[in-house]
Amino acid sequence: MKTRKKRRAVVNGDACVACGCCVKVCPLSAIQVRHGIRAAVDPERCVGCGKCAKECPASVIVLQEVSV
Amino acid sequence: MKKRWYDYLWIAELIYMSLGFFNILFAWLGMLFFCIPLIISLVWGTKGYCNRYCGRGQLFGLLGGRFGLSRKKDIPGWMKSKWFRYGFLIFFFIMFFQMLWNTYLVFAGAQDLRQVVTLLWTFKLPWHWAYHGTFFHQGAAQFAFGFYSVMLTSTILGMITMILFKPRSWCVYCPMGTMTQLICKAKNGKDALT
């Protein structure tokens, strides 16, 4: 079976300031700030549009290719 | 996305900053911007204030985003490092307590009211035109001058980093944000994310 490459947002948790800017711009509500500590991406929902990465003031969100 | 009432809190921030130019005693309202985030993080263990209700962040987002005033460049690595964020928080605390000390001196009668707003902890701007006397002790006015200095200074710093880097760069090193995140870490523990 042929594997498809897909992009997903990944948060560098240690450097995340939990400001929530990413949450506001995500069109699929695929990212949430958990316990006021860091943002976390729901890999099932994320389609890798990159809006969160662009918005993140600390630039701690990157898009990574994953095989699905 | 549907706008909610709290998406317009940038208007409250604008009104607050404007009021300080007319009557410095309105600076006391800024205590809300200090207390609400702390209460939310202490009671619910979240950064709900940063995430939803921060009018200042919204204002920077608006100016840097829709108004295009931001270069939208990455913030330098050292500005998002822990030592800078915690260092800035400590510095902010020291300056805040110095402001409280000055307020105490006026309350105690050891110092006269200084009708100045201190920008960037250095530059003293005459601000007498926004002081029309007070029903309370002059110390209350001294606190207002000091508190407004803190608010104006942080707004200016936020504006500078908004222009140079991404719109909400202030959020990266905002002392309230750092403090509430620390509270959330202490309250929820490291295990919360595993």
Image: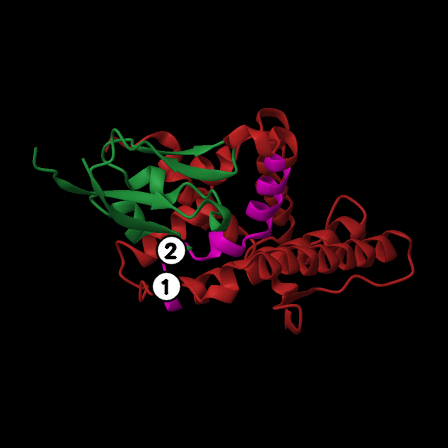
The residue that mark 1 highlights is: B74
Q: Are marks 2 and 1 in contact (CB under 8 Å)?
A: yes
Looking at the rendering, the stretch of residues picked out in magenta corresponds to B163-185
List the single residue furthest toward the front. Answer: A1
Letter of the chain in green: A
The residue under label 2 is which amino acid type?
Ser
Q: Which mark is residue A59?
A: 2
Identify the residue at image location x=24%, y=30%. Answer: A45
Image-based side of B78 in relation to A50, left or right? right
Q: In this rendering, is residue B55 above or below B149?
A: above
Position in image of residue A35 (x %, y %): 51, 31
What colour is chain B?
Answer: red
- In this rendered view, identify the residue nearer to me: B44 or B37: B44
Identify the residue at image location x=60%, y=37%. Answer: B185
Q: Do callouts 2 and 1 point to residues on the same chain?
A: no
Q: Is residue B173 magenta?
A: yes
Query: For numbered disc 1, what is the local secondary structure?
Result: loop
The residue under label 1 is which amino acid type?
Asp
